[in-house]
Image (cartoon, rainbow, N blue to C red):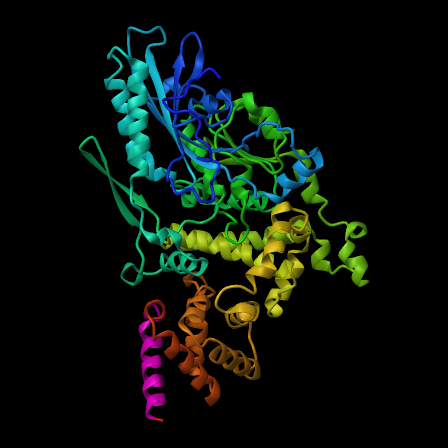
Amino acid sequence: RNGHLCGQEVREGSALGYMSDKRHVWYVVLAEFDLIEGSVIRCEYPESTRVSNSFLAENMLPEGSHENEEDETIFMLPQPEKEEGKTKNSSSKSDVKKDQMDKPARPALHCLSCLLAKKDSKVKRGSITKAIAVCSPHTFVHAFRPSIQLALNELFTSTSQANKPNNSHSVMKELYDTLNAMSFSASLNLSPVDISLVRASQLRPKHTQPKPDLKLEVKWRGKESVTIVPAAVGEDEIGEVSLLSLVERFKNDFMTIFNAILLERRIVFIGHHMPARKVCASVLATCTFISPPLEGVKNRIFPYTSLTSLDTLLSTPGYVAGVTNPIFAQRDAWWDVCCDLSTGKIVISSKYQKELDNSWNGQEDLELKKTGRSASPAEQKGFSNVKKLDLQFAAEIRIGLEMGRNEAWLREMLSRYTERIVDVAFGDAASDVESHFLEMNQPRIRFLKATRQFQQYAERRSILMSSGPCGKDTKLVARYVRMLQDGRPSTKDVRRILKFLVVKLNSEEKLRQFLTFLPASRGGLYPIATRLFHADTLVHRLATKLLERIDSFKEGSLWLSSLNFFLLRTYMRAKSSLEKK
């Protein structure tokens, strides 16, 4: 390696024991541009990352970095297994291979690199460029930005000191120790139900939000900085990104990006003459298009990349990449969708467009062959029907944004739209409306079922639908909620649904899970509260009992308080009447 380790030797079991490792930061890395050597890694602390020098340098010092005084990149650091030395009693190759297959995959670390370039007339290039990267198992790496910037400034103010390597070692060690000394709240270990409740609460008025983001103070050589740590972070949510900005940049065409992410197509974001941080932000934002419910988008992203890593990029199915080199726009064989951040225009490759145009082919539809039925007119229209649905959804999004809806609302809307597509793909059409949605979506579902992320979700789905406080009733609870939200159930069906919910939701834990199916983007408790006006006495009484039970604990009371005044007053009257009886 061209770089060198700052201080300690590789410690046995340090970064290897990732499942029990409680450190917030595993590595800090220092890179700089050298006129003779090029981009080099000067220091890795407390040990080697065991990743190639060129990979680190490329991600920390993007092309044209000397032209920007400040920039940053986010990248994923793969964690290779440590090679064990051979012994006389070593296992056979087949035994070793089986042992490796039984081990859980080592998760990649999330890395934030901050770059600083300071002009200096004494050097030929006219500036000195340095970058520090922090590698962490946490996804909220943006919380480390203030400390990294302070450490960078310290390196520049100390460059005139005699022993530079020792000074670099001192600064990197101090940064590592400072970040790992931070105390995080136990709120970081929220259950899936807690995470859903926190995310849903972000859609509500500020006075009804129970769990705000956490403020964390960091001290660096007497200077204090405040970082914000989200109370709940999604599986694919890395750093501090804005899906809202991405949607506004590409207008209604954002649904082209949505479908490309959903169907695992190759996407390139080009930002010619733009700082690397802008293309990074766009790539990271795409991760939140479909997650939740579909997870794992972050495993195929390259927030910033260049021609140097082209082979790795092209060998990654369904990659999402950010680049600043305009040559990518000229090579449509490299991508399926190309998004130009400068113009806001999206181009679909001729190959991908042909697939969409020919998305309906009755001869290839195995599902129709199995059932023996013929294709409906809606199915034969292919992806044009999908586009029609997406345009309707995009119009709903546009209206919401014009009314001042926020980032949380946008993410929730996209998450629910994805969830709806996935549900009907599994045959969970809860009403005639959903059945029509399924019919219109058949071409998209055919593509979706062939993706790796859908197949992985299918494996987890049976567990998800039988886990949590509601146990095996989870799937039926979710289905009944959808029937109340989207369908027009008969009085008999409404009685059956509400009676089931009143009987089964008999604890606070179950009710809290129930609330996760009732986000503000789908009306919150509105589908239940409106049953207070039902002409059927039993329906009225069951709706009152269920709302009263929800009102008995903190989160439920907050959900209830977001109803309009008219519904709240009706509930209070119904509750009072029920208590008298």
Q: Is residue 211 left or right of residue 4?
A: left
Magenta part of the protein: which range? 560-580
Residue 301 seen in this snapshot = yes
Q: Is residue 286 magenta?
A: no
52 w.r.t. 81: above or below: above
Magenta span main SS = helix
Q: Can you say which quadrant of the picture contains the C terminus?
A: bottom left
Q: Position of residue 538 (x, y in %)?
A: 48, 88
Q: Is residue 570 magenta?
A: yes
Q: Is residue 69 left or right of residue 470?
A: left
Q: Residue furthest bottom?
A: 581
At 60% across and 53% down in the image, what residue appears? 457
Seen in the picture, residue 401 relative to 573 is either above or below; the reply is above
Q: Is 8 in front, or is 476?
A: 8
Q: How many labels were placed on the picture? A: 0
**Residue lying farthest to the front in this orientation:** 88
| Residue 238 coordinates in the image, percent (x, y) | 43, 41
Q: Which of these two is toward me, 472 or 489?
A: 472
Q: Residue at x 73, y 50 (%)?
A: 360
Q: Residue furthest left?
A: 222
Q: Residue at x 33, y 89 (%)?
A: 579
Say whether residue 482 is visible: no
Residue 186 picture location, percent across and down? 34, 53
Where is residue 202 drawn, in percent x and y? Answer: 36, 56
From what the image shows, is residue 467 above or below residue 152?
A: below
Q: Quadrant of residue 165?
A: top left
